[in-house]
Image (tube, rainbow, N blue to C red):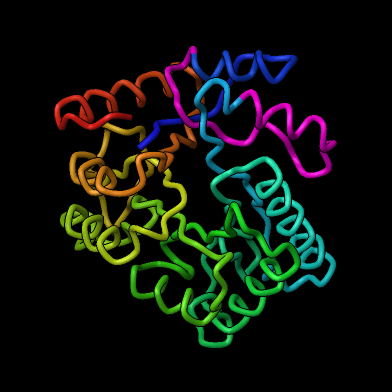
Amino acid sequence: MRLGGPVFEKYATPADWAAAVRRLGYRAAYCPLKPGAEEEEIQAYAAAAAAANIVIAEVGAWSNPLSADAAARSAALEKCKGCLELAERIGARCCVNITGSRGAKWDGPCELDLTVETFDLIVTTAREIVDAVRPRRTAYTLETMPWMHPDSADSYLKLLAAIDRPGCAVHFDPVNLVNCPARYFRNDDLIRDFVARLGPRIRSCHCKDVLLQQHLTVHLDEVRPGCGGLDHRALLRALSGLDPDLPLMLEHLPRAEEYAAAAAHVRTVAGELGVEV
């Protein structure tokens, strides 16, 4: 697999960007461009990535295509299509978004989000996005989440079967699947089960950690890798049996120093296992 994360260093050219990625010791990177970029620029970044042996992991299409607001929903759908098109053109492994929410907060919990009606709406939405682009090199993926589909391996398999498009694949964020104490204390089993059942379809992964707090009631915090209870040994061991170019992307940390510490933890665990990242 290939460890990656965001680049904080300023860069002016594709070569500068690639050099900044490599200085961080990463072999994978988030897409450096946004939809609307000129074809010449897209190809220049793709070439720089290839020359530096960097895999462009994902294009983030973060938006709410399930929004109850018609204008917001329409804008989100167009963003998703544009991001998937960019992923296809630049050669990213995937375009990633969450399914979205029918509630007030685009990524927050809502009582409607796990209903059969919403499941069907997710299927229709994903099909519209994939059919608009018909990707061949990349795929549209839905990030696993704690309170909306897909929230388990079962949920993801059911979604993929219903969407029924080869251009739709899997994005794995194990921390987002840890939504109760049972999953927290047995997250190694959760990881192994998910990878066993969906591994060949995983296009990219997020790497972070989760901490179960001691006060009532159940409270789970996302924390830096190495500061919580996620079994990174189980994660790296499971992922190491998949595509050697599979990205493992650090995210959601406030400063470059935090990313350096997170990367050091992952590399230490990988070294103990004899796994290349």
Q: Is residue 16 left or right of residue 52?
A: right
Q: Is residue 177 above or below residue 15?
A: below
Q: Is residue 74 left or right of residue 22?
A: right
Using the image as rendered, state which of residue 265 and residue 104 is in the foreground.
265
| 45 in magenta | yes
Residue 70 spot, x, y in % from top left: 82, 72
Residue 27 spot, x, y in % from top left: 45, 27
Using the image as rendered, state which of residue 122 and residue 243 is in the foreground.
243
Q: Is residue 211 left or right of residue 45?
A: left
| 134 in magenta | no
Using the image as rendered, state which of residue 37 and residue 208 is in the foreground.
37
The C terminus is located in which quarter?
top left
Q: Is residue 157 above or below residue 261?
A: below
Quadrant position of residue 80: bottom right
Residue 131 spot, x, y in % from top left: 70, 71
Quadrant position of residue 18: top right
